[in-house]
Image (tube, rainbow, N blue to C red):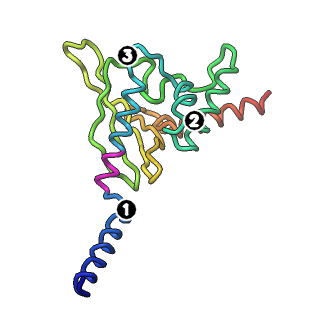
Amino acid sequence: MSACIRYTLALLLLAGSAVSAAPPAQGDAKSRAQTFARSFYDWYTEAGQERNVEVVLLLKKDVLTPELYEALKADAEVTSKAEGELVGLDFDPFLNAQEAAYAYELGEVVEQAGDFRIPIYGHWGDQARPQKHHDLTAQVRCAADGCRFVNFHYPKSKLLLDRDLASVLKALAKQRAIQLRKH
């Protein structure tokens, strides 16, 4: 083999390894975020299945960032011990509703500050004449080890404290701490 051919092969091998070591393109991460969210919502809204926060905490812990998981877990634990009084979430934070719509649709993924925001639309009312509503926006972060939900934003909220799940959980924890100090 001539020196010229060996040199060309060495360059091709180096170029190939440099390309494979490059981080994934933004479009790839965007697609991964969409696929991740679609997979979760297909599972969560599967017909005939009772899904809620406790089921997600038990079976799908890895879909949440550690911070969101811990905050939801703390809220669920306090709620399960409360007798007769409301001390935690009083709605489904993954649907932003008391009950599920008959169908859910994911909107276009938008990259924002390194995370991805995915609008979630519920189809409500008569199935023959559905009403599509922007119920929430999922905030997803993708890394080499996978994608996770960072937060859920609620566009119809009128109060600042209720505009996203992390804020709601933080406010509830603060209220519970104040109540404990009073007793």
Question: Which of the image's four quarters has the C terminus?
Answer: top right
For label 3, the SS is: loop
Determine if the magenta segment contains residue 30: yes
Q: Which residue is mark 2?
A: 169
Residue at point 36%, 29% (across, down): 135
SS under mark 2: helix
Q: Amino acid at mark 1?
A: Pro
Crowding near pointer 3: few (<14 within 10 Å), some, many (20+)? few
Residue at the farthest left position: 128
Residue 84: image quadrant is top right
Q: Is residue 150 left or right of residue 14?
A: right
Q: Earlier in the sequence, mark 3 or mark 2?
A: 3
**SS category of the residue bearing label 1:** loop
Farthest right residue in view = 183
Asked whether 116 falls inside the magenta stretch, the response is no
Where is residue 24 drawn, in percent x and y? 34, 58
Residue under label 3, please give it.
47
Q: Could you tell whether 16 is left or right of 56 in the image?
A: left
